[in-house]
Image: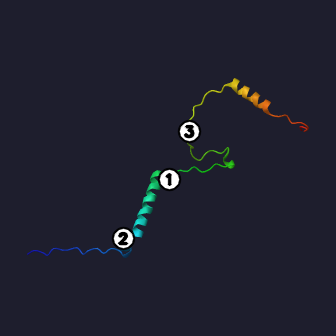
Amino acid sequence: MTLPALKKAPKERSALLSFGLRNPLLFYGALLVLLAASVAIVTRGIFSGTPPLTLADVGTPAAFDYKAALDFTYSEVDLDATEKKREQAALAVLPEIGRAHV
């Protein structure tokens, strides 16, 4: 004697899920939000900006490392050229006349 094969009853979809799948605007809108969130997380687009520095930030330790936009090479200071530039700048300043220095 063989037993009859048991058939599984078909699962019913929830009303909200079937409404979302039937409505293309809702479906593609949700897909677009998911895609935008994935791109933002992968590229760190939301968190990549460094906060602007203010005058209050001067002299305080940085909360994180700042990356320079350009690379540069340090070279030793030419003391003779520096002194020459200082003298030129001092000579370029006009003297103040008629004002008492306190």
In depth, the one of 81 and 76 nearer the eye is 81
Pinpoint residue 35: horizontal percent, then vertical percent: 42, 59
Task: Locate residue 24 relative to residue 52 in the image: left or right.
Answer: left
Determine whether label 1 and label 2 are within 8 Å by CB: no
- Identify the mark nearer the N-term, 1 or 2: 2
Classify mark 1: helix, strand or loop.
loop
What number is the disc on residue 45? 1
Task: Locate residue 89 relative to residue 39 in the image: left or right.
Answer: right
Pinpoint residue 28: horizontal percent, then vertical percent: 40, 66
Type of residue at label 1? Gly
Q: Is residue 78 above or below residue 56?
A: above
Q: Is residue 41 above or below residue 67?
A: below
In the image, what residue occupies the spot 66% across and 25% down?
Answer: 78
Q: CA distance from mark 1 to mark 2?
A: 30 Å
In depth, the one of 96 and 62 nearer the eye is 96
Q: CA distance from mark 2 to mark 3?
A: 50 Å
Pinpoint residue 67: horizontal percent, then vertical percent: 55, 42
Determine whether label 3 and label 1 are within 8 Å by CB: no
Classify mark 2: helix, strand or loop.
helix
Task: Locate residue 83 relative to residue 102 in the image: left or right.
Answer: left
Where is mark 2, residue-wise? 21
Type of residue at label 3? Leu
Q: CA distance from mark 3 to mark 1?
A: 21 Å
In depth, the one of 97 and 49 nearer the eye is 97
What number is the disc on residue 70? 3
In the image, what residue occupies the spot 39% across and 69% down?
Answer: 24
Q: Residues within 10 Å of mark 3 (few under 14, many from 20)?
A: few
In depth, the one of 42 and 23 nearer the eye is 23
Identify the image quadrant of residue 77.
Answer: top right
Pinpoint residue 17: horizontal percent, then vertical percent: 37, 72
Task: Locate residue 85 relative to residue 12 in the image: left or right.
Answer: right
